[in-house]
Amino acid sequence: MLYEINEKAIQLQNQGKKITKLNIGDPDLATPPEIVEAACEAIKKGRTKYSSGFGEQTLRNELGKIHGVSADNIVITPGSKWGIFSTMYLLLKDGGNVVIPTPYWTAYGLIAKTLGVEARFCKTELDSNWQVDLQTFEELIDNDTRLIILNNPCNPTSKVMDEKIVDGIVKIATDRKVLILSDEVYSKISFVKTKSILDYDNNNILITGFSKMFTMTGWRIGYVIANRELINKIGKLNQITFSNVPVFIQDAALKALEIRNKLTNEIREVYCNRAKIASEILSNSKLEFSKPDAPFYIFPKREGLDSEKFSMKILDKGVAVAPGTSFGDYRDHFRISLTAPEVDLRAALLKICEALDE
Amino acid sequence: MLYEINEKAIQLQNQGKKITKLNIGDPDLATPPEIVEAACEAIKKGRTKYSSGFGEQTLRNELGKIHGVSADNIVITPGSKWGIFSTMYLLLKDGGNVVIPTPYWTAYGLIAKTLGVEARFCKTELDSNWQVDLQTFEELIDNDTRLIILNNPCNPTSKVMDEKIVDGIVKIATDRKVLILSDEVYSKISFVKTKSILDYDNNNILITGFSKMFTMTGWRIGYVIANRELINKIGKLNQITFSNVPVFIQDAALKALEIRNKLTNEIREVYCNRAKIASEILSNSKLEFSKPDAPFYIFPKREGLDSEKFSMKILDKGVAVAPGTSFGDYRDHFRISLTAPEVDLRAALLKICEALDE
């Protein structure tokens, strides 16, 4: 229902209605001017031709340096989502299942459904601070398991996985010879330290993007770090699908990397502040929730709530949120993205609290 | 081998070698300044957020007016190639076969192969002016045929299909209840009149893009016109793959439409002139070929040539062309893209003629 609500919110906006869009992780902040300038310069220089399906060599080299891997282990994708879709398609098209902790980012479930892939879910709960139970997790894995998907920090909970839990999952995956796809799009702007899948010495897959780190959501650029065989397959799939990420967008991304520390510090500060504000306001409601470890979300719960109905109701009042059912079996939760300016965010959060009491 | 040669040509360029790239349909011409300006303006205005998987309403409305269809029958894609991939994926994922005249654009064959779809080829020949034999064509269709792919004008031959042949194929498709996907990316800049699939009153699929019409290859934007059911499925697939074509690119495309007559006239004139030059130079060689009806290609033949070896040999001499085997069973043909400035084009064509005699 996540995308339906988004399409409806866009329609309402097109009709001239004011909607505070807390339904998707699309920051209200503008893309930093240095990145904007780099893109315009590149377009004007004629960086508008076909290019490699693997991405620009300059960008791959720079990412290789940052992550301490060879450029040959990196492929540029139109957003991290394409990295996830293409990896799932390539690893699972001949059958097999994928194991995913929940609540999960909506796209994982929808991609599995579209591809006709069996997804096995390991449910985590607010009461246990959203941590994965390793025994339950391992029981879901069998000889047909081809992939584990982790999202650390997690969308929709904004929780960071306990290091020992990540250690445990990596151990299970190694023992059972299953690849891990680790979606780490929020890690560089996390409020607390996170463990990366690249910290482990094995054959796993890191997927991330520029969207969240640099407020470049609509630019559609991300990347995959993996073994060369998979990178080669994704690059070839890129060639026969979208050809290449526009070169001028890759040039803009290269600029973002150049000033990455400044930018990520700024973004982290803004969202840390918003997370505090939201936690304060929601503490006065009847909602239960865990405080975010990272941007952009809070995933509150109210016993007995039908969040699908609630999301439609609150959309009519000019606030878009995402129902918990978009993230797994969480009908009594909903997700709030803290992606609006403070004034709008405060007003929208108060509307949410009021609507819960109606 | 088309993409391998392209990746190799890019590598050689990265090493500082001068390569005249006549291997892909990527014009040397710059994207028109009005389009560049529109893109930069849009980026600076903050048109850099997530948007609809179906495309911007303004752009869909304008395309709807131009083609005389409802905006609901249009979805914006990252290049026409994504339109073809997603249509083939959605219509053929549960089995069935696709019928395609050859020589075909490389991507059709590679997509079918990647998706594990049976592709049935209807071979056409230079000797019969590349026209489809309707009886042979019909014999390839059976109860499992889900799709016919036409490319009019054709890449790599640059021939326009005879109107009566298109009529005949549409009749066969209608009788046999098979959908036609018509890839018409070169039609608006064709030197001669072409028949569009939208001229027929039925349920077919038009796929086209901005790349060739407006020298916007590396921008990656195209669109599909089809029945609402298919448009809805493609829009949903967009949501879970690349999310949306960047809005600022859609704004640039909208600008291109505004001045489309001026731009397409200019592009047509340039390529018509290059086609004449190439025909003159190649007439003095031992190559057989048909004169192009449209941009960007010539697909000459030399009895007994191994075009894969020839392509590698000529790449070493600084000219990239595409071997005929990339377009079906045409080892003794190769494809020349007329996508270099006149001086470079003349020099490269002369090198090709010389190399044939070595």
Image (cartoon, coloured by chain):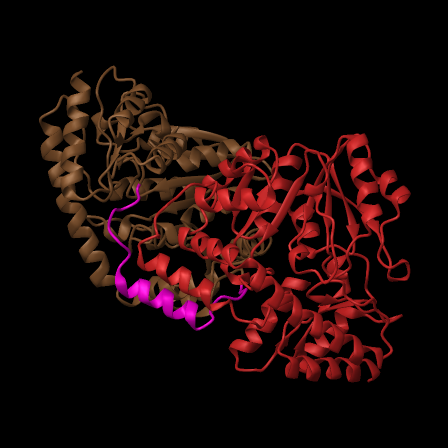
Chain colours: A brown, B red
Q: Is residue A99 left or right of residue B3?
A: left
- Where is the C terminus of chain A found, in terms of image quarters? top left
Query: Where on the picture, by quarter, is residue B270?
Result: bottom right
Identify the residue at horizontal 65%, vertical 32% (top origin).
B94
Q: Is residue B281 visible?
A: yes
**Front-most of residues B126 and B240:** B126
Q: Quadrant of the N terminus of chain A?
A: top left
- Report the side of A345 relative to A203 (left or right): left
Q: What x and y, as percent, mark residue B205? A: 65, 40
* Residues rendered magenta in the picture: A25-52
Q: Residue at x 28, y 43 (%)?
A: A153
How far across and down, in percent of the image, does residue A87 sit?
50, 46
- Count of picture labels: 0
Q: Nearer the viewer, residue B250 or B113?
A: B250
Up the image or down, B11 lies above or below A239; here it is: below
Residue shown at 30% from the left, 44% from the top: A26
> Picture coordinates of residue A324 (x, y %)?
31, 26
Residue B239 magenta = no
Instruction: Name the quadrant containing residue A350.
Output: top left
Q: State whether residue A143 appears in this view.
A: no
Q: Position of residue B321 (x, y in %)?
A: 70, 71
Compared across the picture, whether B143 is left or right of B266 comes to: right
